[in-house]
Image (spheres, rainbow, N blue to C red):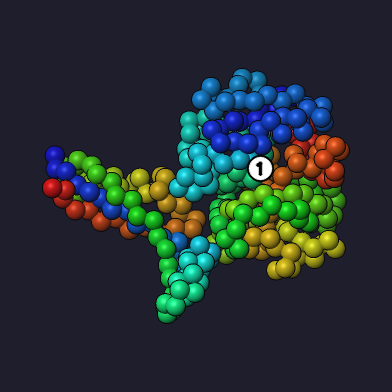
C-alpha cells in the first residue's frame, strides 16, 4: 500500500502527511507535481499548505496543474484520494468534490482545535469512528467556509455525503461551534464516490501521539479500506 | 486580426457572504464615511488579438469559465474594447 503525497509549490503539510501515514504502517512517498503521478500508487493525499501562494483563489492554480488530470483519472479508476485543507480547496476547485471553500466568515486566518461530529461512519475515512462520535482535530485556514447552493447541499445531505460537521464538545452543531461560517457547519464531504473525500481539519496533525491527541488516525486509516 | 482588451469582472453571486467586503466597509465607516453597502469584485484585463470583438469575448468567456471564476460562488461579465 503506497500513498503518494502530492507536493505543489507552497505545500507545507506534505512531509507531515508522509510521517503520519508511515506511523500507521503505510508506505508513503512525496510526489513533486511536475514529475507526474508515480506508477503503482494505491492512494493519493492532496496536502495542506498554500499552493501557488493562494493566488486567484486558494487551490485554483494547483487544481489546474497537469498532475490533477492524472489524479482525477486515478480517482475515477478507484484510487482513494484525500484532500486536506489546501488539498480540500484543490479538490473542490478541480471538481473532485462539490462546492467551494472560501473566505472564513471572520475574514481571519484561524488556527485552533475544533470538535467534529461524524455524520456518516460508512465511508473509508470514517469507518473507524461511530456515527455521531465527536472527534477533536486542528484547523489552520483562512478560506475554509464551505459554500454551495442550497439545492446542491440538500442533495449532498440526502446522499449522505457529509463526513463531518463542526460541533461543540457534546456534539451539538451550533453557530457558535462553527469556526468559519461553513454552510450547515460542513467540514468535509465526499466526491461522487466515497473513496474521494476532502476536509478542512487536519487529521495528519492529530495522528502522532507525540503531538497530543490522535483522533485523526481513523481518517488516514481509510487508505487501507 | 485586431487588438482587443477584454475586461472580465468576477463577482460573488448575490447572497454569498463576502467577509472581506464587510471588513472593508467597516473600515470605511471607522474613517467617518457613510455607506449602505459595499461589494468587491476582481477585474482582469486581457490583451489579445482576435478576428472580431465576438471572438475576443468568446475567448475571454472561456478563460472565465475555466479559471478566472468559480461557478459555485461567482458570476462574471465580459466587456471587449478595441485596443489602441
Q: Which residue is drawn at 61% across and 19% down?
A: A39
Visible residue check, residue A122:
no
Q: In which quarter of the image is the N terminus of chain B?
A: top left
Q: Would you place residue A42 above or below residue A208 in this image?
A: above
Residue B66, x across and y down, in percent: 41, 44
- Residue farthest to the front? B31
Residue A218, x across and y down, in percent: 81, 41
For mark 1, name the chain.
A
In the visual, does A151 lie left or right of A123?
A: left
User: For mark 1, what is the residue?
Assistant: A84
Q: Rate crowding at label 1 as few (under 14), some (14 to 19) or many (20 or more) other CA atoms within 10 Å.
A: many
- Residue farthest to the top? A39
Residue A150, x across and y down, in percent: 57, 64
Look at the numbered disc 1 and give the secondary structure of its residue.
strand
Q: Residue at x 51, y 45 (%)?
A: A54
Of residue A64 and residue A119, the one placed in the foreground of this image is A64
Q: Which residue is drawn at 73% across and 59% down?
A: A166
- Quadrant in the rendering for residue A48: top right
The number of numbered badges drawn on the structure is: 1
Q: Which residue is drawn at 45% across and 54% down?
A: B71
Of residue B10 and residue A72, the one placed in the foreground of this image is B10
Residue B60, x across and y down, in percent: 30, 47
Visible residue check, residue B8:
yes
In the visual, does A169 lie left or right of B31?
A: right
Q: Would you place residue A126 above or below residue A173 in this image?
A: above
In the visual, does B13 lie left or right of A14?
A: left
Q: Would you place residue A74 above or below residue A94 in this image?
A: above
Amino acid at each position: 500500500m503506497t500513498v503518494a503525497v502530492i507536493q505543489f509549490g507552497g505545500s507545507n503539510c506534505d512531509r507531515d502527511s508522509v510521517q503520519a501515514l508511515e506511523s500507521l504502517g503505510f508506505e508513503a512517498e512525496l510526489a513533486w507535481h511536475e514529475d507526474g503521478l508515480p506508477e503503482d500508487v494505491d492512494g493519493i493525499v492532496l496536502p495542506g499548505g498554500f499552493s501557488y501562494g493562494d493566488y486567484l483563489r486558494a487551490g485554483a492554480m494547483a487544481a489546474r496543474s497537469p498532475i490533477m488530470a492524472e489524479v482525477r483519472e486515478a480517482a475515477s479508476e478507484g484510487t482513494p484520494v484525500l484532500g486536506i485543507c489546501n488539498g480540500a480547496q484543490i479538490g473542490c476547485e478541480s471538481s473532485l468534490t462539490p462546492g467551494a471553500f472560501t473566505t472564513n466568515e471572520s475574514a481571519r486566518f484561524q488556527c485552533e482545535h475544533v470538535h467534529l461530529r461524524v455524520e456518516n461512519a460508512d465511508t473509508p475515512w470514517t469507518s473507524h469512528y461511530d456515527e455521531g462520535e465527536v472527534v477533536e482535530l486542528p484547523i489552520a485556514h483562512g478560506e475554509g467556509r464551505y459554500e454551495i447552493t442550497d439545492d446542491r447541499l440538500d442533495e449532498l445531505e440526502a446522499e449522505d455525503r457529509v463526513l463531518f460537521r463542526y460541533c461543540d464538545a457534546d456534539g451539538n452543531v451550533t453557530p457558535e461551534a462553527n469556526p468559519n461560517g461553513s454552510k450547515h457547519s460542513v467540514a468535509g464531504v465526499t466526491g461522487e464516490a466515497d473513496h474521494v473525500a476532502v476536509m478542512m481539519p487536519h487529521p495528519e496533525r492529530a495522528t502522532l501521539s507525540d503531538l497530543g491527541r490522535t483522533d485523526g488516525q481513523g481518517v488516514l486509516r481509510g487508505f487501507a479500506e | 486580426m485586431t487588438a482587443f482588451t477584454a475586461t472580465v469582472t468576477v463577482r460573488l453571486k448575490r447572497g454569498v457572504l463576502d467577509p472581506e467586503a464587510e471588513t472593508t466597509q467597516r473600515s470605511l465607516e471607522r474613517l467617518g464615511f457613510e455607506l449602505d453597502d459595499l461589494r468587491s469584485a476582481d477585474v482582469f484585463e486581457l490583451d489579445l488579438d482576435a478576428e472580431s470583438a465576438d471572438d475576443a469575448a468568446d475567448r475571454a468567456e472561456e478563460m472565465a469559465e475555466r479559471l478566472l471564476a468559480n461557478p459555485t460562488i461567482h458570476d462574471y461579465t465580459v466587456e471587449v474594447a478595441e485596443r489602441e
